Image (spheres, rainbow, N blue to C red):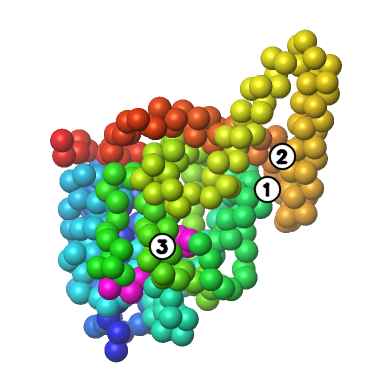
Amino acid sequence: MTTVSFVIPVRNEEEYIRASLQSLLEQSYPASECEIIVVEGQSSDQTRGIIEEIRERNLQLRCLDNSAGIVPTGMNIGIRAARGEVIIRADGHTVYPRDYAANCVKYLARTGADNVGGPCVTVAANESFGARLVAAILSSPFGVGNSKFRTSRDEGFVDTVPFGAFRREVFDRVGMYNEKLVRNQDNDLNARIRRAGGKIYLTPALTTQYHPVKDFMGLLKYAFKTSKWHIFTLRENSESMGLRHLAPAMFLMLILLLLPASFVSPTAFAFLIGMLCTYTLTGLYFSVRAKTGSNWNVAVVQPIATICFHIAYGAGTLFGLRYLFGQPSARPIRPGLPIQQ
């Protein structure tokens, strides 16, 4: 039977790590052929204690140290220590269905792909308005563009998947995770797989539930911190980012050009107003179409909130232009204990 290794890089995940690990420990795949490797990145909350508590009762769970505190370093530590023929990149924010490992192995064999993954269903962190608004934005095609793993349940070959399941030999062929990339490391790895002639497959059979940040301001900070890595990521690998990653920056640049011009040009003013109205109405169409239950308050606010999300995302990308000639600090985005210097 094919051996499987889950590798989970974590840092300050006390709220979700227990549920995530429990879902992996309850996999239908034989425990003797399935190991779980948590690579802990110097957390300052109760994450390490929770992991150790669970580890004492489950021999298939191991915990390794990641003194650098960032995801790509944690993944590389875990991959090198893993014994599995299939490496599954898991996440401490995500809950997995019971047949996840079995389906990863099945679809790697059935499709011949080097990496398989599934849709990521965004679940509100709680029932607050802010948490539901964040989940709505990240689940909408208007919010995240043509990111198929967030918005589609179609099955087939794609350019990238989140938290993929890899044939182990792919790392010998294309290399390990790029440890310069605090963000976008999955995009980079998948681009290298495609460049080497490999294939990436998306199937609803591997659908997972992901819990994002709890409030709207947290989402704006997340958007800025993530997108400021885009330019540097393109420097590292020009095939790793698509148009959807750069579209918010283009939108923001157009606003910044039209805004001052509108004070002296009626044409520029009319174009600016028309663009913003069209944008808002399009957003309202998508939010109302996706509305569920009593979420009318979210649907009404969502178009304006999405504009703010896209502006924050675009601002991060433009801020990242400074890394055309330099390298951003490879420090963890999540807070925690001091990291290796």
Q: Position of residue 253 (x, y in %)?
A: 61, 28
**Left or right for 172, reference 317:** left
The amino acid at mark 2 is Pro
Q: Residue 142: which disc?
A: 1
At numbered mark 2, what does the secondary structure look like: helix, strand or loop? helix
Q: CA distance from mark 3 to mark 2?
A: 37 Å
Q: Which residue is mark 2?
A: 303
State which mark lies toward you, 1 or 3. Answer: 3
Q: CA distance from mark 1 to mark 3?
A: 29 Å
In this rendering, is residue 296 above or below 96?
Answer: above
The amino acid at mark 3 is Arg
Say which quarter of the image contains residue 198: bottom left
Instruction: Say which label, 1 or 2, has the lower sequence index.
Output: 1
In this rendering, is residue 175 above or below 304?
Answer: below
**Left or right for 90, reference 219:** left
Highlighted range, magenta? 160-169
Which quarter of the rendered picture does the N terminus lie within? bottom left
Say which quarter of the image contains residue 95: bottom left
Mark 1 Cα shell of 10 Å, populated few (<14), some (14-19), many (≥20): many
Look at 63% across and 50% down and name the residue there: 145
Residue 78 or residue 211, whichever sits in front: 78
> Could you tell me if residue 22 is visible in this image?
no
Mark 2 Cα shell of 10 Å, populated few (<14), some (14-19), many (≥20): many
Instruction: Say which label, 3 or 2, has the lower sequence index.
Output: 3
**Left or right for 55, reference 141:** left
